[in-house]
Image (spheres, helix red, strand yellow):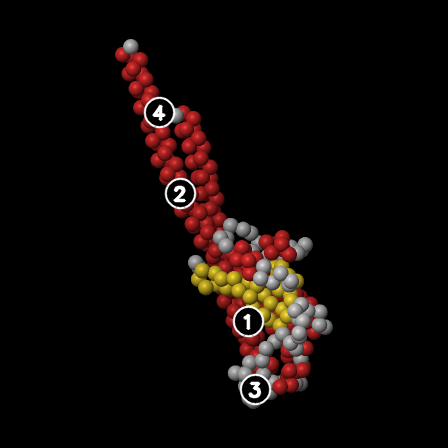
């Protein structure tokens, strides 16, 4: 019995240490949620604005001459994969990588340390990824696309549905597609639509990238808080069960000792 109580006591200490760790990580995630959500909303607003501007431009017949609107027969694909800098966030990273497996022939560009571990020798933080980083990446990608070095560009990221629900998704960014819903009769572009579109595309792609990174980071923080809350509840339940087992083992040991004492005194 002595060995059992010692083993149970050690397990309780171990699980209690894990409980403190999950609580600490949950608190850190909670402290980041409001700022991450604010940045996500600003990123969404900016991305929507550049989408609307580009949609007006690509609706112009002249813009069909743009290299960014040319659909090619090739299948050379580049995909930006946005994952987290850390683990312990439930299925957040795993869902992104699972979606990436659907494109085995693609060339991946990683954002987030976990994505870099898989697809790149460089380390690019998703938490600290800035608009400056996005525009540098966008200019390089747009130049390569215009030169015909690849045929389409996509972004695998995570969509924020709610604090408890986040979904991996892919968005195709290049080539641009024309929308029949946009009308340009009341819009005047100077010097001309084609020139402005070609100049605006790197800004457009950068806006889509930074919005996807910020939304993915908000998803990572929310997923980590949910995962740590769940882990904390499980750890507390395990401690309660172990404490009950410990009390029973200790009571059994005491009862056995009393029985042995009584038996010894009677002989």
Residue 206 image position (x, y, % from top left): 61, 69
Q: Are marks 3 and 2 in contact (CB under 8 Å)?
A: no
Q: Decide which of tag 4 and tag 3 comes sooner along the chain.
A: 3
Q: Decide which of tag 2 and tag 1 comes sooner along the chain.
A: 1
Q: Decide which of tag 3 and tag 1 comes sooner along the chain.
A: 1
Q: Nearer the viewer, residue 23 or 54?
A: 54
- Residue 59 visible somewhere in the drawing: yes
Q: Decide which of tag 4 and tag 2 comes sooner along the chain.
A: 2
Between the residue at mark 3 and the residue at mark 2, the CA separation in whole angstroms equals 61 Å
Between the residue at mark 4 and the residue at mark 2, the CA separation in whole angstroms equals 25 Å
- Report whether 244 appears left or right of 122: left
Q: Quadrant of residue 140?
A: bottom right
Between the residue at mark 3 and the residue at mark 1, the CA separation in whole angstroms equals 20 Å
- Which residue occupies 58% across, 83% down? 59
SS assignment at label 3: loop
Q: Residue furthest right?
A: 147
Between the residue at mark 1 and the residue at mark 4, the CA separation in whole angstroms equals 67 Å
Q: Decide which of tag 1 and tag 4 comes sooner along the chain.
A: 1
Q: Quadrant of the C terminus?
A: top left
Q: Nearer the viewer, residue 259 or 127?
A: 259
Q: Are marks 4 and 3 in contact (CB under 8 Å)?
A: no
Q: Which residue is mark 3?
A: 184
Q: Which residue is mark 4?
A: 253
- Which residue occupies 60% across, 63% down? 103
Rate crowding at label 3 as few (under 14), some (14 to 19) or many (20 or more) other CA atoms within 10 Å: few
Q: Which residue is mark 1?
A: 47
Residue 51 image position (x, y, % from top left): 56, 75
- Which residue occupies 63% across, 69% down? 153
Q: Quadrant of residue 146?
A: bottom right
SS assignment at label 1: helix
Q: Which residue is mark 2?
A: 236
- Residue 143 visible somewhere in the drawing: no
């Amino acid at each position: 019995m002595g060995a059992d109580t010692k083993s149970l006591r050690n397990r309780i200490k171990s699980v209690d240490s894990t409980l403190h760790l999950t609580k600490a990580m949950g608190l850190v995630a909670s402290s980041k949620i409001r700022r991450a959500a604010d940045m996500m909303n600003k990123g969404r607003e900016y991305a929507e604005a550049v989408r609307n501007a580009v949609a007006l431009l690509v609706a112009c017949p002249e813009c069909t001459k743009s290299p960014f609107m040319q659909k090619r027969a090739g299948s050379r694909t580049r995909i930006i994969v946005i994952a987290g800098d850390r683990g312990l966030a439930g299925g957040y990273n795993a869902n992104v990588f699972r979606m990436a497996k659907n494109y085995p022939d693609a060339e991946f560009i990683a954002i987030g340390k976990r994505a870099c571990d898989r697809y790149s020798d460089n380390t690019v933080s998703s938490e600290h990824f800035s608009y400056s980083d996005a525009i540098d990446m966008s200019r390089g990608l747009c130049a390569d696309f215009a030169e015909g070095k690849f045929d389409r560009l996509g972004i695998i990221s995570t969509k924020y549905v709610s604090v408890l629900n986040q979904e991996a998704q892919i968005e195709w960014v290049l080539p641009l597609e024309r929308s029949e819903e946009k009308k340009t009769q009341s819009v005047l572009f100077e010097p001309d639509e084609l020139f402005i579109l070609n100049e605006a595309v790197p800004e457009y792609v950068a806006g889509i990238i930074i919005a996807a990174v910020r939304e993915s980071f908000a998803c990572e923080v929310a997923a980590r808080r949910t995962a740590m809350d769940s882990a904390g509840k499980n750890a507390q339940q395990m401690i309660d069960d172990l404490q009950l087992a410990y009390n029973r083992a200790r009571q059994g040991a005491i009862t056995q000792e009393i029985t042995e004492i009584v038996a010894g005194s009677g002989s």
